[in-house]
Amino acid sequence: MWSLLRRLHRNRRTWGEGYAALIRYRTALRAEHTALSFNDVPRLVETILALPDHVETVFLIGLPPYGTAIVQHEVAAHHGPLVIADNETMTASLAALTLTALDRQGVWPWMATVYISQSRHAPLLEDVLTQCGIGTVTDIDTTNSTREDTRRIIEQCDVLIDLSTTTTNLV
């Protein structure tokens, strides 16, 4: 499998095509890649609404969370296809990883303290973790923290989700 993924990585023209190839290879879904411009959200909504009727789901990659929310709302209002964004799949993955880490530590979720650094990169994460039963979820800023400061923060919580190194050019 890894050799196929390496070939996909080497031979793809864009990372969006690689995403589509990965979805086709690892799931029963038929995925197609279509390059869209995110500079004009209303035009993006029009493009999605103009897709053929057999398109049931659109997976947006690289759109900032606020843009995703606008697109999802507008497309749903016009009964268009389901719109899922990469930041939502990242949120689900981080929530699952957090619950797994707590389980491995033997910490009950309702007794856990989870810190999220730079939660603006995953704006739904705090609510999702709360809905998963995490006792305390706190947004912290570690941008200017030294290693010693970060070490002290880690000692105070059960899980630290550090999104401070996430690319900010899309936000």
Image (cartoon, grey):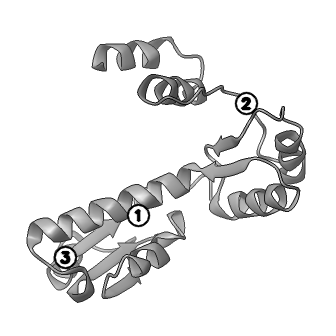
Mark 2 lies on a secondary structure that is: loop
Please say whether residue 148 is visible from this viewpoint.
Answer: yes
Res 35 label: 2
Res 154 label: 3
In this rendering, the label closer to the viewer, 2 or 3: 2
N-terminal-most mark, 2 or 3: 2
Q: Nearer the viewer, residue 74 or 158?
A: 74
Residue for badge 1: 164
Labelled pair 2, 3 in contact (Cβ < 8 Å): no
Q: Amino acid at mark 3?
A: Ile
Q: Disc count in the image?
A: 3
- From the top left corner, tell me how far across and down residue 87 is, in percent: 54, 55
- From the top left corner, tell me how far across and down residue 156 is, in percent: 18, 85
Q: Quadrant of the N terminus?
A: top left
Residue at x-position 77% and y-position 32%: 54
- From the top left corner, tell me how far across and down residue 114 is, in percent: 29, 79
Residue at x-position 56% and y-position 28%: 20
Residue at x-position 22% and y-position 62%: 100
Q: Amino acid at mark 1?
A: Ser
